[in-house]
Image (cartoon, rainbow, N blue to C red):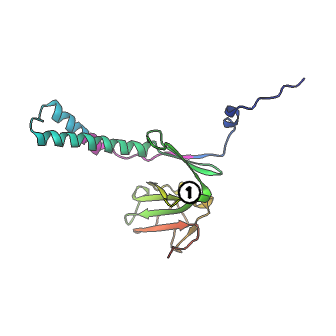
Amino acid sequence: MTEVAEYTPAAVEEQPRNVIAFSGTHRSMAVGIAMFAAAVLAFSMDLTHVFFARAVAWTFVFWGALLIYGSLIDVYQSYEITDDTLIIRNPVRFLLPTKQWAWANIQRLDVVVRRPDAEYEDATLKIYYQEPGELNIEREDRVYHPELARLIIERAGLQPVEKTNPQDFAHLPQGKGAYIWNKTGRMAS
């Protein structure tokens, strides 16, 4: 008598997938921490007798917390490339902590270089996604990563809009500009 293995969802998830993962980018939290600390010091030193001083202290609390939270979102954001989708995970994002974008629906990728003689930190990777039948376009921004850009362009089937778009993603162009890849290979008129 032979045993028949039961189907369980956990057994399916244990099978190895072809996944390439990219971690988030690290940004300085110094401004957020300094604003939050200044507000805490103002309250602890009892400098908030006047309404204006109290309002400024609370403003520093809120802005400091928002800046720290924004930095944490960048740190914990991860990108996973599978055969079928781009998966964007962020455990600290309250709304929609996991996004799964099918390659066929990724419409455009921009590499924006903000400085001459740019390093990777000086360029931004912008990924545009549009669900079929929807009017809104979602966009995710992150610090430029050459391998992530190359894989998204290849898997989504994007074409360069200009002939000046970089072919070697490891070397950023030397100058300010925006380099665009989309499904058609030409700018919409």
Residue extending farthest to the right is 1
Q: Relative to residue 184, is residue 103 depicted above or below? A: above
Q: Give the secondary structure at mark 1.
A: loop
Judging by the rendered image, the residue that carries numbered circle 1 is 131
Magenta stretch contains residue 149: no
Q: Which image quarter: residue 4?
A: top right
Q: Is residue 22 magenta?
A: yes
Q: Is residue 28 above or below residue 113?
A: above
- Res. 119 image quadrant: bottom left
Looking at the picture, which amino acid does disc 1 mark? Glu
Q: Is residue 186 left or right of residue 37?
A: right
Q: Is residue 10 left or right of residue 108?
A: right
Which residue is more in the foreground, 95 or 109? Answer: 95
> Residue 181, percent across and down?
53, 66
Residue extending furthest top? 1
- Where is residue 90 shown, x and y percent of the image? 48, 42
- Residue shown at 56%/59% (left/top)? 106
Q: Quadrant of the N terminus?
A: top right
Residue at (39%, 58%) from the top-left corner? 122
Q: What span is colored magenta in the figure?
A: 21-35
**Mark 1 Cα-neighbour bin, 10 Å: few <14, some 14–19, many ≥20:** some
Residue 107 at x, y percent in the picture: 55, 62
